[in-house]
Image (spheres, grey):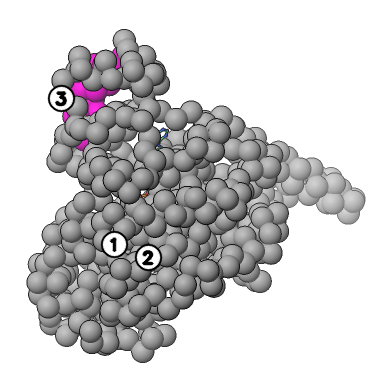
Amino acid sequence: MPAIKKILVANRGEIALRVMRSARELGIKTVAVYSEADRNALHVRFADEAVYIGPPPSAESYLRIEKILAAAHSTGADAIHPGYGFLSENEDFAQAVEDAGLLFIGPSAKAIELMGSKLAAKAAVAKFNVPLVPGTSEPITDVNAAKKIAAEIGYPVLIKASAGGGGKGMRVVEDEASFHEQMERAISEATSAFGDGSVFIEKYITKPRHIEFQIFGDKHGNVVHLFERECSIQRRHQKVVEEAPSSILTPEKRKAMGEAAINAAKACGYYGAGTIEFILDDKLNFYFLEMNTRLQVEHPVTEEITGMDLVKLQIRIAEGEKIPFAQEDLKMNGHAVEIRVYAEDPANNFLPDIGTLQTYKRPQGHGIRVDDGFEQGMSIPFYYDPMIAKLICHAEDRAGAIEKMIRAIDEYEITGLETTLGFCKFVMQHEAFRSGNFDTRFVENYFKPEVLVSANEQEEIIASILATTLLNGNGNSKQADENTAKQPVVSNWKKNRL
Ligand code: ADP
Ligand code: ADP
Ligand code: MG
C-alpha cells in the first residue's frame, strides 16, 4: 500500500491538533476542515491547509460526508483521520472514504457497523468466549416477556439502547412496578437520539468498575493489547477521570482480560486502534460492555505508560504495515492519570458553562501533558462538546501521579467560566480514589456541590483574615478593612474553585 502524503482530519479541537502533530512528525502534510464557529481555531492555524465546510451546527459541517470528501479532493489529500465523535463511528463514512479511493485511518466499515450495535457486538464476541453481562440477546418488544426475563435476571436491571453511546439511552429499573414505564421511556429516548428504538436488558451490576483495554490490529490478522485504562470516575455514565494502569488488576486478571479483549477484536476481523470496554463486579468478574471502534478520548494515558504514539501507529497500520512489536515486548512504565477539563459547572449538576477563557494558563513541568484546542481570549463554542482540555500526569507510581495532578490543577488558571478542575481536585484528594476503593458511583456517593462551594468560601475567609491581619500589622486598621473588601487575592483564589 502506498505511503500517505497528506491527511485530512475530519474533526476539530484538541483531537484534530493531536492527530496533525503526529502526522507532521512523520513528514505528512495536513488538511483541516472547519465550520463558521471555528474560523480562528488552533487546528485551522496549525494545518498546512484548511477548508471551510459550513455553518456551526455539526449537522451542517462536521457531519457532512460529501463536504468532507470534496475538501479532500480539492486539496489532494490521500487519507482521512476521523478523530473521535462526529463521523468516527459512522460506517457509511468509512465506506465512502474508501469508495472515493482514499485511505480511512480506522477499521473497516464492516467492523464499525458490527460493533456499532451493542446487541450485534455481544452476539459476535460471545462466539469467541468473551464473558457477557447476563441479559437479553435480542431487542425486546414484548413487555410481559421482558418482565419475565428481568425477574429471572434479578432486579435492578438496566434497559439499554442497542445503538446507544455517550452514556445516553440507559435506564436503571429497580423493581417490576416501574419496568413498563422505564421501558417506554428508554424506547422513546433511543428513537429520538439514535433513530433506532431497539433496547435490551442487562443485569445492573452493582458497585461496577469500568475497565477497558486498548487494542491494535493490523491488516495481516495480528492483534495486540496495550494494557488497560480505568475509567470508573463518571458523571452521567460519562468519564471524567481516567488512569492507566488500573489500581485493582492483578497480573493474572490483566492477562485474562487482555486475552478476552484480543478475542473480541478478532471476532470482527479488526484492524486499527480500538477499545474493548468491560465492566467488573465487586468480585472482579469481568463482562464485555461494548467496543469503541476509534481512537478514544483517554488514549494519552496509554501513550504515557507505553511510550508509544497511538496516532502514528494508526497511520502505519492504515498504510498496511504490520504491528511493529509483539505482545511480550510491551511493558508498562509508571502510572498516568488524565482529567477532562470541561466547561461545566460541577456545582450545578455538571451543566455546560460556555463562555470566554478570560485567563487561560496551562500547568507545566516534568511529567505533565496538556492536550487542548484553545488559547486565552478564545470562546468555547456552544455547538460542540464543552471539553476545554485534557490534563495528563505521568509519574513513577500512582501516588506520584496523583500528587503531580493536584499540583498541576493548582497551577492551571482558568477564569471566565466554570470548569471541572475543582471537582477533579476533589477526586484526587478523596480517600476512596486514593486508596483505589471506588466504583462508577463515586460521584453520587461522595460528591456534593457544597464540597466545592464551602471549600471555596473557607479559602475566601482565610484569605480575608490573612489580608486583614497583614494589613493590621501595618497599623492602619481602617484602611485594612477597606482593602479587605476589594482584595484581589480573593478573586484570584476563586479562579480554580478549591
Ligand atoms: P465513550 O463513548 O465510551 O464515552 P469516550 O470517553 O472516548 O468514549 O468519549 C467519546 C465521546 O465524547 C464521543 O462519542 C462524543 O459523544 C464525545 N465527544 C468528545 N469530544 C468530541 C468532539 N470533539 N467531537 C465530537 N464528539 C466529541
Ligand atoms: P456508552 O455507549 O454510552 O458508552 P456503555 O455500555 O459503554 O455505553 O456504558 C456506559 C457506562 O454505563 C459504563 O461505563 C458504566 O458506568 C455504565 N453501565 C453500562 N452497563 C452497565 C451495567 N450492566 N451495570 C452497571 N453499569 C453499567
Ligand atoms: Mg462506552
Q: Nearer the viewer, residue 117 or 135?
A: 135
Residue 463 placement, left or right of 352: right
The kind of secondary structure element at disc 1 is: loop
Q: Is residue 224 above or below residue 197?
A: below
Q: Which residue is mark 1?
A: 270
Q: Is residue 188 magenta?
A: yes
Q: Which residue is mark 3?
A: 141
Residue placed at 61% from the left, 49% from the top? 250
| Residue type, label 2 | Val
Q: Nearer the viewer, residue 344 or 251?
A: 251
The kind of secondary structure element at disc 2 is: strand
Q: Earlier in the sequence, mark 2 or mark 3?
A: 3
| Residue type, label 3 | Thr
* Image position, residue 44 (x, y; %): 31, 75
Q: Is residue 296 magenta?
A: no
Q: Earlier in the sequence, mark 1 or mark 3?
A: 3
* Image position, residue 93 (x, y; %): 16, 63
